[in-house]
């Protein structure tokens, strides 16, 4: 069935489909497993056509399970990357990685065991192969790092594992992966193959007249961030310093053990995401690695995880910034919040571990006052005067329900649009004399319009081509929030001189 594709370049088939719902039932799942540092994440990235997983020379970089989706030979396939498995290691992180991998194996219809073709057969490979053979799942052996034809005989040494489906591959260069994925597809039941075939629909014919009529008059009104995006789905990045409870919060919000939780700072490295549907609204929560100061990141994996955390923050709609109640809001927290603010993300401050200052306080002091703590936090985060502050205990589950209701409001307000007529009626009632602006910087405001959403962006047309004074901007932001109810999101105001 698939022989006609044998001679084509494997890169031509690795097509990432980011709009697919990764948790949609019926799509066959392929789990990638193996001991640390054999190239599992490189193989995962190669198959899904994206640098989704962090890759480096340090062993044990991947810890949580990561999901991706690809199209291969016209069929859809879900792929899971797992952390390096050492079956007999009972330390906290390795044992939690094994739990995550076992969850992936339960979901999978096919499993690829990855081994390092440049090294000798190791005891963890043998133990892991035996464990997988007992599971009865379709099992394939990928002998990785076979970069040249001369190295292929070395792959035969791994026949001793007793896995019939052996494939010499090079995940880094894409060699041999077409044969591996062909075999995975052929092992699936015919009905599953039929159900997951991607429809080859012809491109839609555009009605040019209708398209021109529907295009906004101002090109800035096109809202590129919302194009091709499901309006019901909100991407929520969970950000913060290491060990403030981000993974615990993700597990609480999703009702799962999706992320590894431990008292060791920096446990999460790759961004872990999970989709939750609630009252017809979809929230994709993304647990990011803890962001440290540059001088505190030593290992390359930690440096890359911080870069990826920033990347996922900028791709999100809303950020939940988690702070440790016991430590209060620190300068690092303010820096992290600044990343979200400057990128235009909506933001909600989550004060976690609040129970340690109230019901579980053990230092003999009276319970902390919520109003006092909030005021102290706002003194540090003065630029986040708009951001709601919620007090929760992710471990106990107290206060977490309010996160969903606040997210729904913020997501709706983030996409809210105010008509030009409403804006101009609003301007007539604004007393700009209350804004303390030097006379040399004063401008006459002619009219105002909303240029974009997500974040709400307003264009102010003035009689002079001068930069709008900071006091004008802050004053207008507060008045707009008060009049139109924007919460949890920065408002961008730009001005132009009307000729």
Image (tube, helix red, strand yellow):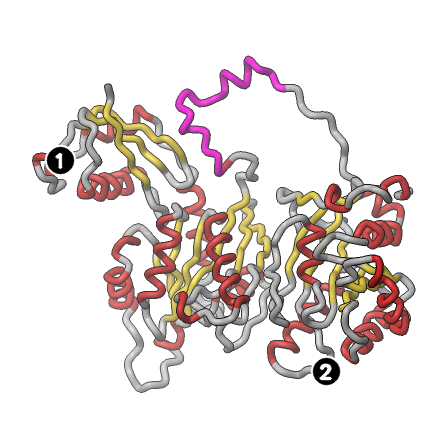
- Sequence-earlier tag: 1 or 2: 2
Q: Could you classify mark 2 by the number of other residues whose Cα lies within 10 Å: few (under 14), some (14-19), or many (20 or more)? A: few
> In the image, what residue occupies the spot 27% across and 53% down?
383
Q: Secondary structure at mark 2?
A: loop
Q: Is residue 374 left or right of residue 142?
A: left
Highlighted range, magenta: 206-225
Q: Secondary structure at mark 1?
A: helix
Residue 267 belongs to the span the image colors magenta: no
**Residue that protrudes farthest toward the front in the picture:** 150
Q: Is residue 426 left or right of residue 203?
A: left
- Total numbered labels placed on residues in the image: 2
Query: What residue is disc 1 on?
Result: 441
Residue 379: give x, y in percent of width and height: 23, 61
Q: Is residue 93 left or right of residue 442?
A: right
**Residue that protrudes farthest toward the top in the picture:** 209
Q: Are marks 1 and 2 in contact (CB under 8 Å)?
A: no
Nearer to us in this view, 254 or 18: 18
> In the image, what residue occupies the spot 36% across and 50% down?
341
Residue 76: give x, y in percent of width and height: 75, 45
Residue 395: give x, y in percent of width and height: 49, 72
> In the image, what residue occupies the spot 9% across and 34% down?
440
As drawn, 287 above or below 316: below
Quarter of the figure that contains the N terminus: top right
| Residue 364, quarter of the rendered image | bottom left
| Residue 393, quarter of the rendered image | bottom left
Q: CA distance from mark 1 to mark 2?
A: 71 Å
Residue 210 belongs to the span the image colors magenta: yes
Nearer to us in this view, 393 or 286: 286
As drawn, 183 above or below 480: below
Q: Could you classify mark 1 by the number of other residues whose Cα lies within 10 Å: few (under 14), some (14-19), or many (20 or more)? A: few
Residue 48: give x, y in percent of width and height: 68, 50
Query: What residue is disc 2 on?
Result: 88
């Amino acid at each position: 069935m698939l022989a006609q594709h044998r001679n084509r370049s494997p890169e031509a088939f690795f097509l990432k489909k980011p709009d697919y719902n990764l948790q949609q039932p019926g799509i066959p799942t392929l789990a990638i497993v193996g001991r640390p540092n054999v190239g599992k994440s490189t193989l995962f990235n190669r198959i899904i056509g994206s640098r989704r997983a962090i890759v480096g020379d340090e062993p044990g970089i991947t810890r949580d399970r990561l999901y991706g989706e690809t199209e291969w030979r016209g069929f859809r396939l879900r792929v899971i990357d797992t952390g390096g498995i050492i079956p007999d290691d009972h330390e906290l992180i390795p044992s939690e990685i094994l739990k995550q991998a076992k969850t992936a194996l339960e979901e999978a219809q096919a499993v690829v065991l990855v081994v390092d073709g440049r090294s000798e057969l190791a005891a963890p490979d043998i133990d892991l192969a035996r464990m997988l053979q007992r599971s009865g799942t379709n099992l394939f052996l990928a002998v990785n790092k076979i970069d040249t034809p001369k190295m292929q005989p070395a792959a035969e040494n791994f026949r001793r594992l007793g896995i019939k489906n052996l494939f010499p591959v090079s995940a880094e260069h894409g060699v041999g992966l077409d044969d591996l994925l062909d075999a995975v597809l052929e092992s699936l039941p015919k009905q599953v193959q039929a159900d997951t075939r991607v429809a080859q629909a012809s491109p839609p014919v555009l009605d040019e007249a209708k398209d021109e009529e529907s295009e906004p008059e101002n090109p800035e009104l096109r809202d590129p961030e919302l194009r091709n995006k499901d309006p019901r789905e909100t991407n929520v990045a969970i950000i913060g310093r290491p060990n403030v409870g981000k993974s615990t919060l993700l597990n609480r919000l999703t009702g799962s053990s999706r992320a590894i939780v431990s008292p060791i700072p920096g446990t999460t490295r790759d961004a872990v995401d999970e989709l939750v549907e609630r009252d017809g609204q979809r929230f994709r929560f993304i647990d990011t690695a803890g962001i440290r100061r540059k001088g505190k990141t030593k290992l390359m994996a930690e440096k890359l995880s911080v870069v990826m955390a920033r990347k996922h923050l900028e791709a999100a709609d809303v950020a939940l910034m988690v702070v440790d109640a016991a430590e209060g809001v620190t300068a690092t927290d303010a820096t992290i919040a600044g990343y979200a603010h400057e990128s235009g993300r909506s933001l909600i401050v989550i004060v976690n571990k609040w129970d340690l200052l109230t019901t579980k306080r053990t230092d003999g002091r009276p319970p902390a006052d919520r109003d006092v703590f909030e005021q102290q936090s706002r003194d540090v985060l003065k630029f986040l005067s708009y951001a709601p502050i919620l007090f929760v205990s992710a471990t106990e589950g107290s206060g977490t329900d309010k996160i969903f209701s606040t997210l729904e409001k913020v997501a709706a307000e983030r996409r809210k649009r105010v008509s030009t007529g409403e804006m101009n009626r609003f301007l007539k009632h604004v007393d700009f004399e209350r804004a303390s602006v030097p006379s040399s910087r004063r401008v006459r405001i002619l009219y105002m319009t909303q240029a974009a959403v997500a974040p709400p962006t307003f264009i102010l047309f003035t009689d002079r081509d001068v930069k709008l004074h900071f006091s004008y901007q802050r004053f207008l932001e507060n008045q707009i929030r008060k009049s139109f109810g924007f919460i949890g999101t920065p408002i961008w105001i730009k001005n132009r001189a009307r000729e």
